[in-house]
Amino acid sequence: MKRNAETKKYCGNCGRHTAYNYPDQVFCGKRLSDSQDPVVQTLWHCENWSPDSQECNCVKDATKKQE
Amino acid sequence: MQRKDFLQEPVKHIKINEKLSVDELIQQFKNSGSFGAGRLAQACDIYERMVRDDDCTIFLALAGAMVPAGMRSLIADLIRERLVDVVVSTGANMVHDALEGLGGHHYKGHWLVDDFVLYKYHIYRIYDIFVPEEDFVKLDYQLTDIFDQIAEENNGKPLGSNEFTRELGKRIRDKNSILHMAYEAEVPIFLPAVRDSEFGFAHWLHASRKNVKHRLVLDAFKDVPEIVGLCRRSARNGMIVLGGGVPRNTVQSAALASGRGMDYAVLITMDRPETGGLSGSTLEETVSWGKVKKTADKTTVVGDAMIIFPIMVASVVERLTGSFKRVPNHERQKLQAVEEAG
């Protein structure tokens, strides 16, 4: 389960996110530059998902909170 | 000099009692006159003379992470009480002021910590202070809107850094904020290296959005005549430097360009002069440039500004009890101009 969460295409896995309301929401710089709402759920994913994951606990902690 | 001239004043030993106030302790330091204690007592006396000199403009140069560490309210209070007239700061210190003014916090942490664990939790470390990344992100997000407003209101006109800080201070409605208090008290805050801070990245976010109507433009050179003019119009000038770096250089260069030279100078630093860097250069070295007068009332206290400066301010404030109210030099000049015109 843990391994699966880490490899899923979650915004919290994307290399472009920063924390917004840890661990539930992340801030997407790409969406801001496109004039879209930059605040998204950590466990949401968009078509611009980048494969460059960050080594952070966002997805792990958001998943744990959701369970 | 004769032998007896070297042996004029014996060291008086420090005496402590249970009722000792801050200034009384400083007087004990003055009696000893030795090492850091003697220099700190000297610094307090010089700052008191600056404050009591009606014709002196007091510049505060601020470098190092003073605001995150807890110096925010102290500096806002100095501005409120008109005990400094001009602030020259790193961009970062004002970023951290804005961060708290817009809802963020700094947390007590520890220097002995696994920094990669902090990284994974999106927490930044400033020695033993922790800052959540989200507070920076929320700051950036709010700043993009604030930058939009400032750019729109000014129709894209380039602003000097002191005009920029004034616009920020107008919008941060927090009585403990340095930026807000400076706005209310009309004390200029110059940020000579504004780009080298989170303001730079917030500007990038603001300006790189696809539908941005007005881009905020800052003109770094616009500050120069402003700050040189402040020095030139003042009969005497004094500076208190915490750290050094770009803020110290900006103040000293204004003193040089105005042809005035500082009349008072207190430098609090832990840096050394051997590298040629400005944070460690001695006040004597600045005399060679004409930035500080040969006859200036000056001292350097080697130590942590987080310890030294609050003690120095507490000591001087204690001396200013009663009806003392400082009217800044530039305010008096304005009043005189109004009276003369009327």
Image (cartoon, helix red, strand yellow):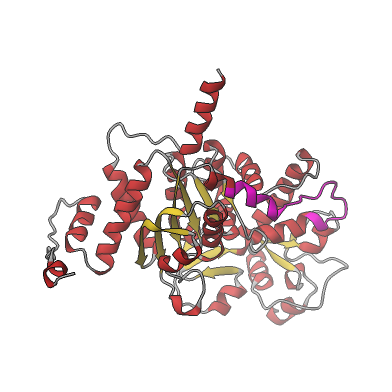
Q: Where is residue B165 in the image (x, y as percent from the top left)?
A: 62, 47
Outermost residue toward the bottom? A3
Q: Where is residue B269 in the image (x, y as percent from the top left)?
A: 42, 67
Residue B133 visible, this orientation: yes
Q: Can residue B219 be found in the magenta stretch?
A: yes
Outermost residue toward the top? B342
Q: Where is residue B305 in the image (x, y as percent from the top left)?
A: 40, 62
Q: What stretch is highlighted in magenta?
A: B207-228
Q: Return the residue nearer the eye: B10 or A39.
A: B10
Residue under the image location 41 percent in, 67 percent down: B284
In this image, B204 relative to B24: left or right?
right
Residue under the image location 42 percent in, 40 percent down: B55
In this image, B12 relative to B192: left or right?
left
* Quarter occupied by residue B137: bottom right
Outermost residue toward the front? B1
Q: Can residue B183 be found in the magenta stretch?
A: no
Tell me: residue B230, above or below residue B30: above
Residue under the image location 39 percent in, 36 percent down: B326
Point out the image quarter for the N terminus of chain B: bottom left
Q: Where is residue B120 in the image (x, y as percent from the top left)?
A: 61, 74
Point out the image quarter for the C terminus of chain B: top right
